[in-house]
Amino acid sequence: MVRVRMADVAARAGVSTATVSMVLNGVNSTRISPQTQQRVREAAEAVGYKPNSVARSLRTQQTRMVGLISDTIATTPFAGRMLAGANDVAREQGHLVVLVDTERDAAAERQALNALNGQRVDAIIYACMWHRVVEVPEGLPEDAVLLDCVAAAGGRAAVVPDERAGGVVAVRELVAAGHRRIAFLDAEERFDLVASRLRFEGYLEVLAEAGIEPDPGLHVRAEPVAGGGREAAQRLLTLPAERRPTAMFCFNDRMAMGAYTAALHCGLSVPRDLSVVGYDDQQLVAAELDPPLTTVALPHYEMGRWAMEVALGLRQADPEVPHLMPCPIVRRASVSPPPAQFSD
Amino acid sequence: MVRVRMADVAARAGVSTATVSMVLNGVNSTRISPQTQQRVREAAEAVGYKPNSVARSLRTQQTRMVGLISDTIATTPFAGRMLAGANDVAREQGHLVVLVDTERDAAAERQALNALNGQRVDAIIYACMWHRVVEVPEGLPEDAVLLDCVAAAGGRAAVVPDERAGGVVAVRELVAAGHRRIAFLDAEERFDLVASRLRFEGYLEVLAEAGIEPDPGLHVRAEPVAGGGREAAQRLLTLPAERRPTAMFCFNDRMAMGAYTAALHCGLSVPRDLSVVGYDDQQLVAAELDPPLTTVALPHYEMGRWAMEVALGLRQADPEVPHLMPCPIVRRASVSPPPAQFSD
DNA sequence: ATGAAAGCGCTAACAC
DNA sequence: GTGTTAGCGCTTTCAT
């Protein structure tokens, strides 16, 4: 790669580098005659000039790069859409994103921050791959924005899914279909999932508004994977008829997948005998189940965009209150009215 | 952020910036007295000096950043492990990865290349989210490395999964269990998947080595999603007993998921009545099926590492022949010997 | 309407 | 053993 500098363009156009800089950046362009501008552009084209952003950054003190520190891009398939959202905004704004995966290792986080600060990125986003409360690493700049997590200490711009509203919309879907015995297949408490508590609140809220007395026996917990969902659903489905649920709201799509299996094993058909709503809208899963799963989508793409917009100053954020991103329901085919004998 | 420069450290330590530079970079360190070194380090610490990589890059002509251009991080959950592999190597080498998602748009690719070249990244990786033959974008540097794709025109360092060997290992697993009527649930030709042809070759190879005459009726095609797998499996399972397969090798895990459903609907149990092997080892899916799916893993992490190693010059690559990364089989619980009446 | 020149913060050849 | 100095390639103020 032959290196051609601004001086080469200047020489060829018979002007100074200052003029070339102004023309090419469209700065003070009124002050430079159209003819000169034309000449400069032609010269740049002719010599194949490509600006050197490193030099530019050194001079201007901004790099047009934003650092994105994430735990575990590796181990969840959710990362993609978050990165995509952040990346799209960055591109629209002529910025680049520098990605660092720290796998939640404190040393790696420190190293990442150093590297990013060293490269003088214009902003930093600190992302988690699932909704959490985090102790932010020491040295994370004040104006870093948190993506899919909130700071334990507070005081940070942050965006997380509106899990409570998601729980509400999920359970309302079931109530609207006529269900009254609605189970919540929750994650076990040991996983300490903030989403768990919030979605449960949403569940309770809808029962209350529908005048349904919550049945503690319908709030069951298991490991938030298919096996857990299966086992929990199994327990529920072997209950005596009058205590058995006609619908299940599952903590995530994997548990819903397990609920499908349990139903099948009990000779029940979804949604005819049992309605199911999941959470996550997991790629390549929710839509592929049989029947396709009605679920609540985690707004990863939108959160990614939001975080980048705040990072780039395109949008204001209140550091005191995390932004709650709506979780839209995705209607597919796993909900129908309850079997006749259970309707009101 | 107060900016403290090398000159500040030099002043405080009572030495020149050259000395500071040498000490802090460990260059020519023999030539500088231990006392001075000590003094410099203390001064750096005291004033909170953080090197400015931008200035360093300008001077040294290397940025310790590598660009990773990818189509669609957004739409597949496979991206993560590839990024993780690349990222890990980069970190080990003190490099940062600059990620650009172009969504396979030519204009975006051009823009990305410009931006990356402008930032003077030390290397470029061009990644696809599934195995393809691509027309590389004009302007992609000669020494860019291709990840999960090969260049139509050839002549590029590239790494892709060894799909043929993957097909072999999958089908051997079935043959070893005693199966002789093994179906291949393939993707339809219109999807134009290079993996499809290759895995089929592996399938045929194993049949040949086992002395099994391939039955064209057992090579069926469908859309490579759960619905397609289900439908294809359905067709196969309604065949007369003597022509029915006892095992299915599925193009991907989603098709295998569909095959499970079909089996269930026919009152067949996996693996007792039907053995199934998938492909991809899709995260949060293969292991969650019931029974957990035996499948062939796509070596995304390893390919990501390989590409980064080549990009950073840690490893040589022959640009004439793409590197084939092994696809290991992941044994779970979907394979067993065929039902007694079908054994030899 | 354009040019000269001073840096941005660092490294490395050369001097002493 | 350590300092001087000349850039890396660009932007921007100040002169003309």
Image: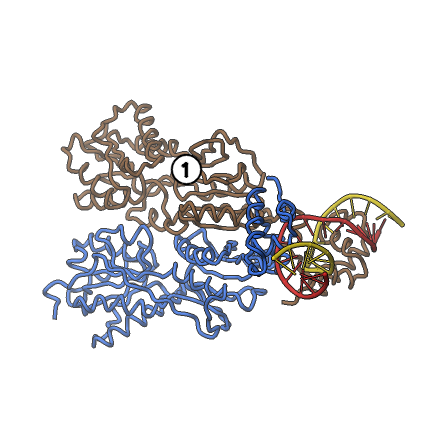
Chain colours: A brown, B blue, C red, D yellow
Q: Residue at x 31, y 24 (%)?
A: A210
**Quadrant position of residue B327:** bottom left
Q: Position of residue B100 (x, y in %)?
A: 52, 54
Left or right: residue B215 compared with residue A71: left
* Residue A111 seen from this side: yes
Q: Chain of mark 1?
A: A
**Quadrant position of residue A43:** bottom right
Label 1, residues with CA under 10 Å away: few <14, some 14-19, many ≥20? some
B232 or A216, which is in the foreground?
A216
Query: Above or below — where is D3 with respect to B242?
Result: above
Query: Above or below — where is B243 with respect to A217?
Result: below
Q: Hey, which residue is sitting farthest left in the picture?
A: B341
Query: Which image quarter holds the C terminus of chain B?
Result: bottom left
Q: Residue at x 34, y 30 (%)?
A: A202
- Amino acid type at mark 1: Val
Q: Position of residue B53 (x, y in %)?
A: 58, 52
**Quadrant position of residue A238:** top left
A271 or A171, which is in the foreground?
A171
* Residue A121 seen from this side: no
Q: For mark 1, give the secondary structure.
A: strand
Q: Which residue is mark 1?
A: A134
Q: Position of residue A251 (x, y in %)?
A: 31, 38
A92 or A209, which is in the foreground?
A92
Q: Position of residue B214 (x, y in %)?
A: 24, 73
Total number of numbered labels? Answer: 1
Query: Which image quarter holds the N terminus of chain B?
Result: top right
